[in-house]
Amino acid sequence: MPGGRIELPFPVWFSRHGQTDWNKAGRFQGHSDIPLNETGRQQAARNGRALRERIKNLDELVFVTSPLVRAAETLEIIRDKLGLPRRRYGVDDRLIEIDLGDWNGKTVDEINAEDPGVWERRQKDKWAYKVPGGESYADAAARTREFLLELKGPALIVGHGASGRILRGYLCGLDRQGLTHLKSPQDLVFELKGGKEKTV
């Protein structure tokens, strides 16, 4: 990882946004601003209830989200289940999903139909592969690292699948190839502390 592992002396909780209709259909979203569907709202509520049982001192937490609506709505639902006002949180553009450029709104089958074998080529080196008109994991790493280094205390962060893998990779000391294939469920929260992660 560029710059190496980031060690923070406090815990960070990370939640991916809940499901959208594009998730359900297998369509890449990237920077497209797609809202949650009902399943996504239920997932966010589940995560909020789980965190209510886990986090004892909410006053110490910083709440921050990607600017995309699916992430912001997820955080608002989580805050509601924590007994907090929905709209008191920070928004940071550096948490936005990787820009998937020409792939936005398309499925893997559609992408491969346009450029046979491109999906397999990306899977072999997701870190370095730059989607046409978009970004690679490597492109997004710098902004993620900068965000993490500015954290001053415990935080609950809501973001995305790919950019969330980078965040988790930095805090867990993973290598580039390992982090790009991490599972990224929408109905669990990751507790990141001391270089390790566990699900909540």
Image: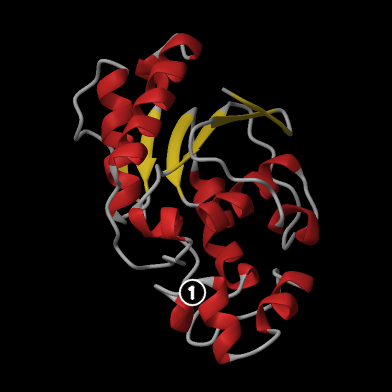
| Residue appearing at x 69%, y 49% in the figure | 182
The answer to whether residue 153 is left or right of residue 172 is: left
Residue 157 placement (x, y as % from top left): 44, 39
- Look at mark 1 in the image and give the residue it sits on: 100
Q: Quadrant of the N terminus?
A: bottom right
Residue nearer the viewer, 198 or 157: 198
Disc 1 secondary structure class: loop
Residue 174 placement (x, y as % from top left): 78, 49
How many discs appear? Answer: 1
Residue 81 placement (x, y as % from top left): 30, 19
| Residue appearing at x 32%, y 50% in the figure | 70
| Residue appearing at x 29%, y 26% in the figure | 79
Residue nearer the viewer, 180 or 89: 180
Residue nearer the viewer, 86 or 57: 86
| Rendered image quadrant of residue 126 | bottom right
* Location of residue 49 with respect to 132 vertically, above or below: above
Please state which amino acid type lies under the numbered disc 1.
Leu
| Rendered image quadrant of residue 181 | bottom right
| Residue appearing at x 41%, y 14% in the figure | 52
Residue 167 placement (x, y as % from top left): 59, 49
The answer to whether residue 17 is left or right of residue 194 is: left
